[in-house]
Image (cartoon, rainbow, N blue to C red):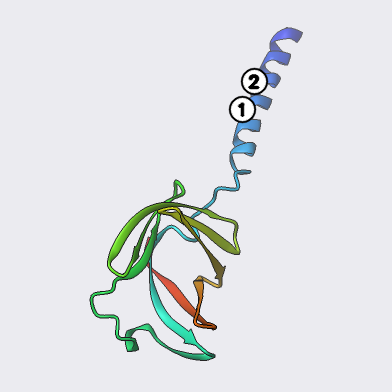
Amino acid sequence: MKHSIAAILLALFCVLSVFALSGCSDADNSAVVGEWTPSTVSINGTTISYSELDTENRDFGFHFYADGNCKIKIGGIQNDGTYTFNETSLDVHYGGKSQKLSYEGGVLTLKLSYNNQTTSYMFTRVSN
């Protein structure tokens, strides 16, 4: 009888451990999974709506999947890539390139520097 109770307790411990450890994964990407499009742009401290830019036929956006894969569309050209999310930023890798986006309050921000200017693109999620 002692052996069967010990076996039952051991089995119960193993089952509970599996459930407890399954929640410990740092790969919870749910906050960023979905399609993201640019909503605003900040150029030299001036923020405007992305729609105010002359971006005709220049699709720009991200689609992040729960498994760490993503699709990136820049200038109408789509690339497949991967990403890592750590609750405050995303590291995105595609076509031999890497970008770091910050994440705060449900907004992704991509900062690009060229011609001694920094332009920040703020993205909002449009679908899950």
The image quarter in which residue 56 lies = bottom left
Q: Where is residue 61 in the image (x, y as percent from the top left)?
A: 36, 67
Q: How many discs appear?
A: 2
Please name whichever residue, 86 or 7, is drawn nearer the observer in this view of the structure.
86
Residue found at the very far right of the displayed protein: 2
The image quarter in which residue 2 lies = top right
SS under mark 2: helix
The residue under the point 54% across, 90% down is 45
- The reply to whether discs 1 and 2 touch (Cβ–Cβ < 8 Å) is yes
Question: Which disc number belongs to residue 62?
Answer: none
Residue found at the very far left of the displayed protein: 57
Residue found at the very far bottom of the displayed protein: 46
Please name whichever residue, 54 or 115, is drawn nearer the observer in this view of the structure.
115
The residue under the point 64% across, 20% down is 11
On-image quarter of the C terminus? bottom left
Q: Where is residue 21 in the image (x, y as percent from the top left)?
A: 63, 37
Please name whichever residue, 80 or 10, is drawn nearer the observer in this view of the structure.
80
The residue under the point 69% across, 10% down is 4
What residue type is disc 1 on?
Val
SS under mark 1: helix
Distance (Cα) linking label 1 and label 2: 6 Å
Q: Position of residue 8 (x, y in %)?
A: 66, 17
> Where 106 falls versus 9 (above or below)?
below
Question: Which disc number belongs to residue 11?
Answer: 2
> Where 86 falls versus 36 (above or below)?
above
The residue under the point 40% across, 79% down is 39
Q: Which residue is identified by label 1?
A: 15
What residue type is disc 2 on?
Ala
